[in-house]
Amino acid sequence: MQVKIVKDKTEGGQVAFDLIKKGIENGAKVLGLATGSTPIPLYQDMIASDLDFSNLVSVNLDEYVGLPEDNEQSYHQFMKDNLFNKKPFAHSYVPNGNAADIDEAAKEYDQIIADNPIDIQILGIGRNGHIGFNEPGSDLNSTTHKVKLTESTIEANKRFFDDEKDVPRYAISMGIGSIMKGKQIILMAYGEDKADAIKATIEGPVTDHVPASVLQNHKDAIIIVDEAAASKLSK
Ligand code: GLP
């Protein structure tokens, strides 16, 4: 696990962008993408660049269950607004949170991932150490599955909704096992809110209590943090 401390999220986005650019030059064809505020500077750099993604495939981590795709808080809509409308990919996959049978949709998504092995996986991190929507206690070998969101995540995400009761209680997420298959993983974290999760991810034991800690077992994982997110690291 490599750790890179940057000045702020703008620099963090540039570092991640450079890694993606190099990856594409070296033949990367499939990008694993994430939502949340963290990857936005990276997506802005991707939009502003002259890179062409029209021959690449993107595979997103997760989606809320039961939120219409065109709801402004759905991850389908987030990705359109923040990247896809400006930089289209050949195909962009986002889990289907409105399937009649979510377990079936999860199986179909695993097949999509198997058919499109992820070269570079972008990740943010939840305050409780979750990646995608794999909450503490998730099986470290899991594939795509339905998730019950924790109170901590509902609390963190309520800022995007008019009312806390509008925050979906369930999501469909790539599993930790699926995420770990990405050839290279780039996790970004900014701000003091993430300092505990980052300390546990980097310096704690590998444990399902902190899903991101499993990245210690990945052979090409890069953690990009600003000084606030790095502030509790001992080294
Ligand atoms: C959500 C997403 C995660 C994301 C996390 C942190 O829970 N499912 O993929 O990493 O939020 O979001 P932010 O980057 O806004 O802090």
Image (cartoon, rainbow, N blue to C red):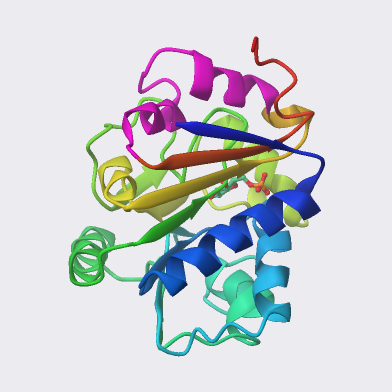
The number of numbered badges drawn on the structure is 0
Percent coordinates x, y for residue 53 in the rendering: 50, 83
Task: Specify whether 86 is left or right of 68.
Answer: right
| Res. 104 in view | yes
Return the residue nearer the eye: 78 or 153: 78
Residue 100 quadrant: bottom left
| Res. 35 in view | no
Question: Magenta part of the protein: which range?
Answer: 195-219
Q: Residue at x 25, y 71 (%)?
A: 116
Return the residue nearer the eye: 104 or 37: 37
Percent coordinates x, y for residue 211 in the rendering: 41, 30
Return the residue nearer the eye: 182 or 114: 182
Task: Specify whether 107 is left or right of 96.
Answer: left
Return the residue nearer the eye: 202 or 126: 202
Q: Is residue 14 above or below residue 212?
A: below
Residue 26 quadrant: bottom left
Q: Is residue 115 above or below residue 6?
A: below
Q: Residue at x 48, y 13 (%)?
A: 204
Residue 104 quadrant: bottom left
Q: Is residue 14 above or below residue 228?
A: below
In the rendered image, the residue lying farthest to the top is 234
